[in-house]
Amino acid sequence: MKETFLNLVTYLKNPILEKDTNTDLKYRFKVFFHILIISVLTGVIISPIFALIHEMQWVNMENHKVEDMFKDMGILQMILLGAIIIPIIEEAIFRGPLTAFKKPKTFKFGFYFFAIIFGFVHISNFELSTSVILLSPILVLPQLLLGGYFGYIRIRFGLQWSMLMHGTYNCIFILLGTLSEF
């Protein structure tokens, strides 16, 4: 796990267009699950910041558009939309084009550009206000980091792996969200 984390951090500091030559599925799933754990822990570690923002009444965190989108859906519909359809579309849009950037400098720019755009697209989950705009880098911090994590696995293992990672990540939080309602 430590090695995967260090490799991920090193990669995010200097992303390069280089596939992982180890195609062993056991190895790939091990790395996949390590990055999934890192992704979930990132969300958990950042969540107290959101609680503080809500408590200070800077942003109403209860008025999140994802909750509105899922409010009249059953669990299977939520999983179909949030853990299958949306991740496939978002990964095709935000990670699909990454391999088109062949030169190291343009790849690095493209990698960061798509991670940042992915993150800031998620500001649309909030009702726009001055506070939301000013706090937007913090409000989309999880998605900014996930954009890097998903980009890493996309480049190292392929687009289908980033789709699987994104879908699994979303599914975990959909299930946690529905369990918390009981």
Image (tube, grey):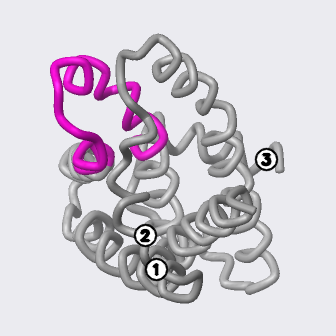
The residue identified by callout 1 is: 73
Of residue 4 and residue 135, the one placed in the foreground of this image is 135
Judge depth for marks 1 and 3 and give the one in front.
Answer: 1
* Circle 2 SS class: helix
> Looking at the rendering, in which quadrant would you find the C terminus?
bottom right
Q: Residues within 10 Å of mark 1 (few under 14, many from 20)?
A: few
Residue name at image x 53 percent, y 74 percent: 167
Of residue 154 and residue 76, the one placed in the foreground of this image is 76
Query: How many dots with numbers?
Result: 3
Of residue 109 and residue 169, the one placed in the foreground of this image is 169
* Circle 1 SS class: loop
Look at the numbered discs 1 and 2 and tell me whether their residues touch, using CB distance below 8 Å.
yes
Look at the numbered discs 1 and 3 and tell me whether their residues touch, using CB distance below 8 Å.
no
Q: Amino acid at mark 3?
A: Glu
Look at the numbered discs 3 and 2 and tell me whether their residues touch, using CB distance below 8 Å.
no
Residue name at image x 44 percent, y 68 percent: 71
Judge depth for marks 3 and 2 and give the one in front.
Answer: 2
Marks 1/3: CA–CA distance:
40 Å
The mark that comes first in sequence, 1 or 3, is: 3
Q: Residues within 10 Å of mark 2 (few under 14, many from 20)?
A: some
Residue 88's spot in the image, x, y percent?
37, 81
Residue 146 position (above or below residue 30):
above
Give the image quarter of residue 181. Answer: bottom right
Residue 169's spot in the image, x, y percent?
59, 64
Marks 1/2: CA–CA distance:
5 Å
Q: Which residues are magenta?
A: 119-144
The residue identified by callout 2 is: 70
The residue identified by callout 3 is: 3
